[in-house]
Amino acid sequence: MEQILYRYNPWWEGEFELKNIIDRPQIFEALKDNLATKQIIFLTGLRRVGKTTLMKQLIYYLIAEMKINPKLIFYASMDDYLLANKNILEIIDEYRKIHKIVFSKKVYLFLDEVAYQKDFELQLKNIYDQQNVKIFASSSSASLLKSKKAFLTGRNIALEVLPLDFEEYLRFKKIIVKKTDKHLLERHFEDFMRTGGMPEYVLTGNTEYLKELVDDIIQKDIAAFYGVKDTQILKDFFLLLMERAGKIISINKIAKILDISPDSAKRYLKMFADSYLIFLVSRFGKTNERLLSAKKIYAADLGIRVYFTGFRDKGSLFENYVYLKIKKLNPRYVYREKNEIDFLTERKTLIEAKYNSEMNKEQKKLFDEFAVEKKMLIKNIFDLKKIDSLKE
């Protein structure tokens, strides 16, 4: 095992190089802000969205800026087949033995895809309670982190990592638009809506990468975990979800198209939501209305959506992007008398996304008459700046 752990931790031997780093100041600052806290920090989100890169950036920061002894920093991916016969406690014990680290000495643990380990919550609790550690962990499956066990209650903070937004995309592509060339922003933005924000795909443009990513999630995070044998039905289900992104979804219609029961369709929908491939938005209203009404669906990444449906309906893609920008504000959609407004945030800001277009008469009436003080009509990339003023 020692050789495996040295491969994961090249900084133990003075070798550490970061490549293709993405400047993501908001999430990275949140990680730095939590360095001094005791809580376990969970990074959640879609596979290959950049969680591992953020961990490596933080490791580099600890070594280069905080001057932490590199041997006090440990990283490993818990879904590695070569570590499958060892639990987390055994792996950490082996790490301490390699460097002769006493339990009173503080160490920094970075555990990628931690939920692949059986009873990871109990193991993390034991490490948290009994050792001098700061733990950063990641998971690409929400279902594995929504455990009914209460081992980590009060001991963890979850930070969700979303695909790159437009500003991050420009920085990653090294695109600089001068103030005198602002007219070019819309063209770059449409390129972004076509490409999405999965870092590797932004870098390479290889569409086969997106197909393999979705296949990987369906195989590992859905079929294998939930015991679904027919992976083709899952692929067909996901294609229907992408075609309906931005719309209120009818479970019964999807069930009928795929010739499955509505109960099966509901289960599959939850599986895809728990894999972070899609997000579901409830209807605004009383508890009964919110729970019983159909959900709206949004793709986690625009590039994945475009891969499956083609680059069409820019208005719907724009609405999807606006949702991703305000997701942390827990938005719901408004529906009254066959008219719909896209979003009402938790703190009661009404938002309608209309890419270079206008609301129809009935929709505008609902928008104007809806009883909230703050309202936003987002029509283009420049209007997106309004969202930045919203606080959680």
Image: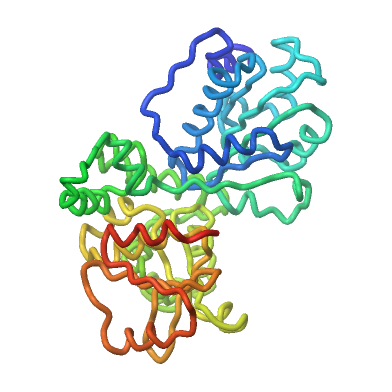
Q: In the image, residue 324 lies at what x, y percent?
A: 42, 57
Residue located at (73% from left, 16% from top): 96
Residue located at (76% from left, 50% from top): 153
Q: Which of 271 and 373 is in front in this view?
A: 373
Residue farthest to the bottom? 337
Instruction: Tell me where residue 143 sits by quadrant.
Output: bottom right
Q: In the drawing, does residue 253 fall left or right of residue 361?
A: right
Q: In the image, residue 204 lies at what x, y percent?
A: 26, 35
Q: In the image, residue 91 lies at what x, y percent?
A: 69, 23
Q: Nearer the viewer, residue 161 or 31?
A: 31
In the displayed structure, 100 sits above or below 216; it is above
Instruction: Tell me where residue 22 sits by quadrant.
Output: top left
* Image quadrant occupied by the N terminus: top right
Q: Which of 80 and 282 is in front in this view?
A: 282
* Image quadrant occupied by the C terminus: bottom right
Q: In the image, residue 388 lies at what x, y percent?
A: 42, 56
Q: Is residue 259 visible?
A: no
Colour approach in the figure: rainbow
In the displayed structure, 139 sits above or below 222; it is above
In the displayed structure, 371 sits above or below 101; it is below
Residue located at (38% from left, 56% from top): 235
Count how many numbered circles sit on residues in the image. 0
Residue farthest to the top? 13
Instruction: Tell me where residue 350 sits by quadrant.
Output: bottom left
